[in-house]
Amino acid sequence: MSLLDVQNLVVEFPGRKGTLRALDDVSFSIAPGEILGVVGESGAGKSLTGASIIGLLEPPGRIASGQILLNGERIDNLPNQKMRHIRGRRIGAIFQDPLTSLNPLYTVGRQLIETITTHLPLNAAQARDRAISLLKDTGIPAAEQRIDHYPHQFSGGMRQRVVIALALAAEPELIVADEPTTALDVSIQAQIITLLKNICRSRGAAVMLITHDMGVIAETCDRVAVMYAGRIAEIGPVHEVINHPAHPYTAGLMASIPDMQEERERLNQIDGAMPRLNAIPKGCAFNPRCQYAFDRCRVERPDLLPAGATQAACWLREDAAVAAGAIA
Ligand code: SF4
Ligand code: MG
């Protein structure tokens, strides 16, 4: 059974000039302990998908239809208080900027202990021990002393380690991490990603890792969902998607991984930009940027179709023979 099921999720932003559809029929699941990457350019809907799951969609954004289930129970329609409990206890969140998750006025220990005692049956002393061991597990040196320090006394990388400890404090089943290293120094990004991966694996926590970096996905995830213009363009096991991209957009993203770029130079870079929400092209939203687009692509919108071990929303997938010649 899936841990998380996102089914036909539609998110809209009502406005004076009409309603903008930001997520359109997004469906995927995450198995217990699985690491799912969600990748795409900025504006693809990655963060909105994450925010919908943790119940932190910014108004006026709203879930217009579809549902989100955690262990088979709907969580998209819960009252705020219940959702707040789920967010601390069963789903942990990690954001780009560690300071959005930490209160600057409290020591990191106080914040950890508060989260632990709110959600787990531990007294203050036990919670402090647990907080120290969490800080150790996330690689904070001298955790016994550092626990009484304030967020500003930590470097950016150390602060994000504290946030990971905080997200894991109540033993959640799922961590939603939205660009957890984008704000950090390049030199420590890999360390933090490796930490996140290892610590979640060892605790059996599933992860939804949102990133624009296909390289991070390749090294971290079991499966990957590629998003484009509010929809999933391709989803499948990470090695399949990387080695045999079935959607032209995925193939273009692959060219953005530096290692793989050496010989191809910029040839495979995708020209153009992600469309704005108020100007999503008819048919396949990717068609103006797609070198394989044909008439049907400009009229009819493709849904996810089976494509080998992955699924891709591309009309080329209707004819595997065409696809094999056209993309790989
Ligand atoms: Fe390109 Fe058409 Fe496939 Fe869209 S459906 S990705 S435009 S070939
Ligand atoms: Mg984002």
Image (cartoon, rainbow, N blue to C red):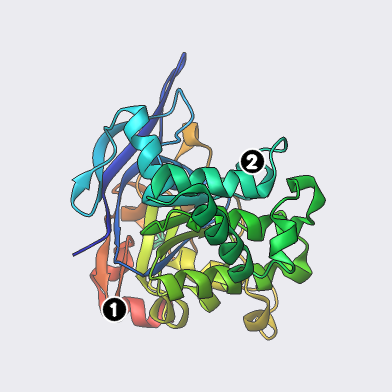
Cβ at disc 2 under 8 Å from ligand 2: no
Residue toward you, 16 or 83 = 83
Quarter of the image with the C terminus in it: bottom left
As shown in the figure, which amino acid type bears the numbered disc 1? Ala
CB of mark 1 near ligand 1 (< 8 Å): no
Is 225 in front, or is 4? 4
Q: Nearer the viewer's eye, disc 1 or disc 2? A: 2
Question: Left of 74 or right of it: where is 291?
Answer: right
Q: Where's residue 152, x and y in %? A: 79, 46
Q: Secondary structure at mark 2?
A: helix
Residue 265 in the image: x percent, y percent? Answer: 70, 78
10 Å neighbourhood of mark 2: few (<14), some, or many (≥20)?
A: few
Q: Which quadrant of the figure has residue 34?
A: bottom left
- Amino acid identity at mark 2: Thr
Residue under circle 2?
100
Q: Residue at x 42, y 51 (%)?
A: 122
Location of the N terminus by quadrant is bottom left
Please name the residue shown 36% across and 28% down the image: 80
Res 78 visible: yes
Q: Is residue 128 above or below residue 281?
A: below
* Residue 179 visible: no
**x and y percent of residue 280 in the render?**
45, 39
Tell which of 47 and 264 is nearer to you.
Answer: 47
Q: Residue 233, percent across and down? A: 39, 59
Q: Residue at x 38, y 72 (%)?
A: 246
Q: Secondary structure at mark 1?
A: loop
Q: How many marks?
A: 2
Q: Which residue is mark 1?
A: 309
* 9, 5: nearer the viewer: 5
Q: Residue at x 46, y 24 (%)?
A: 59
Q: Residue furthest top?
A: 16
